[in-house]
Image (cartoon, rainbow, N blue to C red):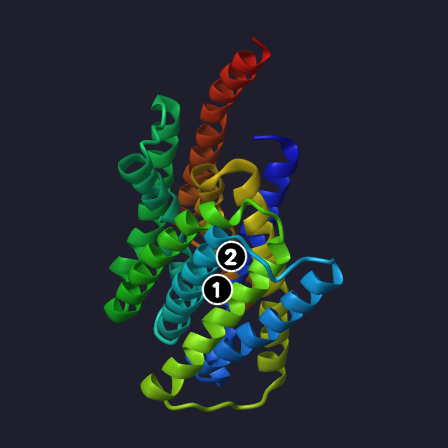
Amino acid sequence: MDARAIAMGLAFAFIWSSAFTSARIIVMDASPLFSLAVRFLVSGLIGVAIARALGQSWRLTPGQWRATLIFGICQNALYLGLNFVAMQWIEASLAAIIASTMPLLVALAGWVIFGERQNALGLVGLAAGVLGVVLIMGTRLNDGVDLTGVLLCVIGVIALTAATLALRGATSGGNFMMVVGLQMLIGSAVLFVAAPLTEEIFITPTWRLAAAFAYTTLMPGLLATFLWVLLLNRVGAVRAATFHFLNPVFGVAVAAALLGERLGPLDVAGVVIVTLGILAVQLSRKPAAARAKAAEAR
């Protein structure tokens, strides 16, 4: 993995993780699914407008259309929708921690479905990441946590895994910003149907709601998703997914700074273990890449 890919991954991880805090702020003053549907509508329209300004086409490949549809439903409607609902009852940092288990699910699916394998160092790195997540999460469970919120986040991360694997088909053929915009509009359409059926819609206008909504629309909504698509195209689903292990690192830190959520010694220890796990996974890829380049040279 080259320096540019690592920089993209770190930027994505920080912006993506900060969305848990902005979501927590939004659901204090607005119904979760309806506010998320509006966010996706705005982000999607902006994304499509930018794509057209860049000369990108509506004519996606069949694989891109299929993946865009799955991504819009699985990541936007299910993963983010369930997380927004869960954020009414659980801390933003806990939601970020649960989301960080996604790389394991991607690696497992890659092995079972696509025949991909991790070497010993990669497996150690993944195991370390899980250990760090468990360490951080253990303190939350001991303090008592809403299990309904946890369950919604777990279902959401499974949906995110499916969305990540689906983007394998959307990262060839170009038109990346168009893909980003269209999958948001798909998520918006699904949530506009689900919201009135599952919740009492309300909006309490406040400055914090306006600021959080603007931030989450432009940064996690557009920029982070665009970086994610580019990263998947550059390094593949399994390697890109390892950056989700940084969700506890950034998610817990941002929630502690902005929401005053607790950051204890075990959280710090878990963050260190997670970071070492990420490093091990990335280093495990270098020998394989070197062998591939040598084979091409021959």
In this figure, which residue is indicated by the disc labeled 2?
A: 17
Q: Nearer the viewer, residue 6 or 205?
A: 6
Label 2: state its secondary structure. helix
Q: Is residue 61 visible?
A: yes
Does residue 87 appear to the left or right of 143 in the view shown? Answer: right
Q: Nearer the viewer, residue 260 or 71?
A: 71
Secondary structure of the residue carrying tag 1 is helix
Mark 1–mark 2 Cα distance, whole angstroms, equals 6 Å
With respect to residue 159, does 101 lie above or below?
above
Residue 25: % across, % down:
51, 75
Quarter of the view holding residue 177: bottom right
Whether residue 220 is visible, yes or no, is: no
| Residue neighbourhood size for the residue with mark 2, other residues' Cα within 10 Å, grouped as few (<14), some (14–19), many (≥20) | many
How packed is label 1: few (under 14 Cα within 10 Å), some, or many (20 or more)? many
Front residue of this view, candidates 15 and 142: 15
Q: In the rendered image, which quarter contains the C terminus? A: top right
Q: Is residue 181 left or right of residue 198?
A: right
The residue located at (60%, 38%) in the rendering is: 5
Nearer to the camera, 73 or 280: 73
Find residue 116 and report its horizontal and vertical position in percent. 35, 31
The N terminus lies in quadrant: top right
Q: Where is 49 relative to 248, above or below?
A: below
State the residue position of label 1. 20
Q: Residue at x 68, y 61 (%)?
A: 51
State if disc 2 and disc 1 touch (CB < 8 Å). yes
Residue 195, quarter of picture:
bottom left
